[in-house]
Amino acid sequence: MTEQAKVPAIRFAGFTDPWEQRKFSNLTDRVSMQSSDPDLPQVEYEDIVSGEGTLNKDLRDKEGGKTGIKFYAGDVLYGKLRPYLMNWLYPQFNGVAVGDFWVLRATECDSSFLYRLVQTDSFQRLANVSSGSKMPRADWNLISQSFFAVPADYAEQRVIAKSLAELDDLITLHQRKYDKLVIFKKSMLEKMFPKDGESVPEIRFAGFTDPWEQRKFSDMYEVNNERNTDCELGYDRTLSIATMTFNGGNGAADDSLNSYKVIRVGDIAFEGHANKVHAYGRFVLNDAGDGLMSPRFSCLRPIVEQRYSFWKYYIPHEETMRPILVKATKSGTMMNELVPDDLMRESILAPCLAEQEAIGDCLSQLDSLITLHQRKLELLQNIKKSLLDKMFV
């Protein structure tokens, strides 16, 4: 290793000495003292947010008494089982680590720096050189005998750890903002659409007082069987129904594009995969642009004026659509299938166009805000990854 390679790409002012190669077992002790003290908080794998080093619950709400490794404030917890899950924690409290954890106690480095070291790519690569395929575990013999570059000056160790801790705090702040917006949107979706047996939603914009009207699907939609017979649209216009995004072919054969259905803006496609949220499948509205979809999916086209920004959120809404789809779907080989004739006999509550527009605009703006916070969060996470690469050797 050259002298130039013994210093990180990014360094704080005032630090110029080359970093030293230190064996991991000289930097830390691996603690193994067992405890089942019921008065100590217990940390398990499921309590840690993967890759974030934060707890997802108040440990005081958990029952104590399980046996694990006792740790003290400032120790580093590293999840050795499936190390790619990135389960690590730098607790500022005493407790018990239950499960496949290494409890690391810094000896010849600052504990806050040790916590950052185990998050680096160089450490993670070694940790993932593990035995076992179903339950891989990091190999302590390999890790403990491996060498890592470390600044000799504890002050440099601390300033690196402090800067990354501040970035973590910023990431956590944006994560909480994002999570709150997602929860708020879920609440708004529940309150801006009528509940079962009601004809008006719980929350309405000023000026709207009329009850929503029952509309038969046959009065609003027709079955869409438009085909791409002239190959008006190419591979680049193939849509994934699940995400309603263009996916460049989606495995379509060369001679099959002319048999694909054309799905126009405002059309709704039925996606029949059942899950915990959508018991019978769901409709997805196309707001991506005119495109192609597999002919095996059912598609409906509006025959009356609509505000697509409203129906984008309303037509997949489970509480609204479940009573309808239970009567208008059947079990298929791989997913539920829509029975269009049955659907056309069903009715759905719908507001006037002006109220559709008001609700759609509100939810669209909320989605834009969620996307903005998601991008900020991803940017900060990318900055952290880059700093972990460039602030360590």
Image (cartoon, rainbow, N blue to C red):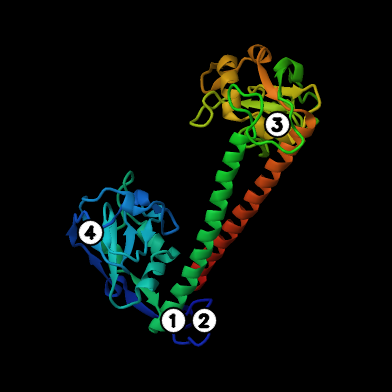
Mark 2 vs 3, N-terminal side:
2
Q: Which residue is mark 2?
A: 12
The amino acid type of the residue labelled 4 equals Ile
Identify the image quadrant of residue 214.
top right
The quarter of the rendered structure image containing the N terminus is bottom left
Tag 2 near tag 4, CB within 8 Å: no
Residue at image position (33%, 46%) is: 133
From the viewer's side, name the closer residue of 70 and 130.
70
The amino acid type of the residue labelled 1 equals Glu
The quarter of the rendered structure image containing the C terminus is bottom left
Label 2 crowding class (10 Å Cα cut-off): few <14, some 14-19, many 20+? few
Tag 1 near tag 4, CB within 8 Å: no
Please state which of the two labelled residues, at mark 2 or mark 4, is closer to the viewer. Answer: 4
Q: Which residue is mark 4?
A: 69
Tag 1 near tag 2, CB within 8 Å: yes
Examine the rendering and report whether any part of residue 288 can be seen: no
Residue 156 disc label: 1
Mark 1 vs 4, N-terminal side:
4
Residue at image position (28%, 69%) is: 105
